[in-house]
Image (cartoon, rainbow, N blue to C red):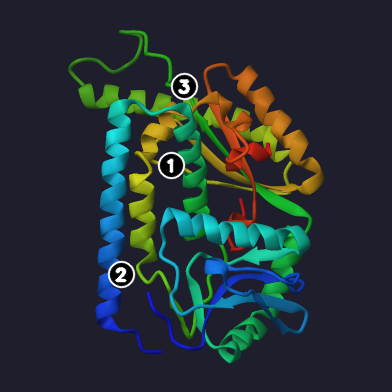
């Protein structure tokens, strides 16, 4: 996709300039545009990135490099602004919000946890108030039991992990009640302990398969939703 | 900020083609049986897609998204990552001990 002459591709709002020389997508030069205490890290492109796997990883590695030297609020992939003037005005307009956002994530990283919860145990035939004459009722009761079972296990996973986190953001998955998916904002000093806690859960919960990826930039902790 | 309509259409077409190609690759891979390494990689990609296309700071106002149809891209990418639900169902316990090239290696 081609871009106007002054189109800026924005990676992050940061608390300090990107260390020179810094490279953005497609080998471009990273620029740091300062607005008061904030810096917008951008690059100029004639051709803007496509949302494919390669470009997503390339974008991510630029943002991760920034994260090593400064506290950042990562932008959503594909954010462009027409010209430095427009961008600086936008940053200035939301300065308070961005400053608060940076304090919220300072010294922390995001860790992602996914787990597959085992299915609920099969109902004991005849012991439930549903029967062949009421298949709908039986189905709903089974569903409800499955949800309760899933919630119990999700809580067993979440409880020890949230203790090691500053914040968490959990996503309910209506279509896959046995899939657990959550993001945790964890102090850098707690990352190792968090990893151990995930490992311990894997041993403890037996069948529940659990995995953790990260550290990520705090993508899930830059908006209003607080878990 | 003028955006050439034809180029926009071309880009969308390219996105669709890319999804098609990956969908096909994904299907073939599943038929062959997916190795654990690929699954781990896909889980990391899934986390990446969830974050970059659904998280992060969104700035409104006088801006253009390079990914104008970002929701569509998001849904498409999620769908083609060798079937999200399959990964979530089959996800291996060894994720946290994945190789150095994987995002999961950090833990």
Mark 2 sits on what residue? B11
User: Of A163 and A219, which appears nearest the observer?
Assistant: A219
Q: Report x, y in % for residue B27.
A: 27, 37
User: Please, is residue A128 above or below residue A28 in the view?
Assistant: above
Q: Does residue A177 appear in the picture of this structure?
A: no
Mark 1 sits on what residue? A173
Q: Does residue A196 appear in the picture of this structure?
A: yes
SS label for mark 2? helix
Q: Residues within 10 Å of mark 1 (few under 14, many from 20)?
A: few
Mark 3 sits on what residue? A118
Q: Is label 2 or label 3 in front?
A: 2
User: Please, is residue B15 above or below residue A170 in the view?
Assistant: below
Distance of mark 2 from mark 3, alpha carbons?
A: 42 Å
| Mark closer to the chain start, 3 or 1 | 3
Q: Residues within 10 Å of mark 2 (few under 14, many from 20)?
A: some
Displayed quadrant of residue B28: top left
Output the chain of dot 3. A
Output the chain of dot 2. B
Q: Report x, y in % for residue A48.
A: 44, 73
The residue drawn where x is 57% and y is 32% is A211
């Amino acid at each position: 996709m081609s871009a106007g002459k002054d189109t800026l591709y924005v990676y992050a709002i940061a608390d300090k300039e990107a260390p020179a020389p810094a490279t953005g997508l497609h080998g471009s030069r990273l620029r740091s545009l300062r607005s008061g205490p904030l810096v917008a890290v951008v690059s100029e492109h004639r051709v803007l990135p496509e949302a494919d796997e390669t470009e997503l990883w390339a974008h991510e590695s630029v943002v991760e490099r920034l994260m090593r030297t400064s506290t950042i609020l990562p932008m959503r992939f594909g954010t462009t602004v027409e010209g430095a003037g427009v961008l600086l005005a936008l940053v200035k307009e939301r300065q308070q919000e961005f400053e608060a956002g940076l304090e919220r994530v300072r010294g922390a990283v995001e860790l992602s946890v996914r787990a597959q919860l085992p299915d609920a145990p099969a109902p004991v035939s005849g012991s439930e108030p549903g029967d062949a004459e009421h298949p709908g009722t039986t189905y709903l009761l089974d569903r409800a039991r499955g949800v309760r079972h899933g919630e119990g296990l999700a809580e067993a996973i979440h409880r020890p992990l949230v203790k090691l986190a500053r914040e968490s953001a959990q996503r309910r998955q209506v279509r896959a009640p046995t899939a657990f998916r959550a993001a945790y904002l964890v102090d850098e000093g707690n990352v190792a302990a968090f990893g151990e806690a995930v490992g311990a859960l894997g041993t403890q919960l037996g069948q529940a398969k659990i995995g953790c990826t990260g550290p990520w930039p705090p993508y899930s902790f830059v908006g209003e939703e607080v878990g | 900020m003028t955006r050439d309509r034809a180029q926009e259409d071309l880009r969308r077409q390219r996105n669709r083609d890319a999804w098609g190609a990956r969908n096909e690759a994904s299907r073939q891979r599943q038929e062959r049986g997916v190795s654990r390494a690929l699954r781990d990689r896909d889980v990391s990609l899934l986390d990446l897609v969830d974050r970059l296309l659904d998280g992060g700071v969104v700035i409104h106002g006088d801006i253009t998204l390079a990914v104008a149809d970002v929701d569509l891209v998001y849904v498409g990418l999620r769908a083609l990552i060798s079937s999200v639900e399959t990964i979530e169902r089959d996800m291996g316990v060894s994720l946290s001990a994945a190789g150095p090239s994987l995002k999961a290696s950090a833990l």
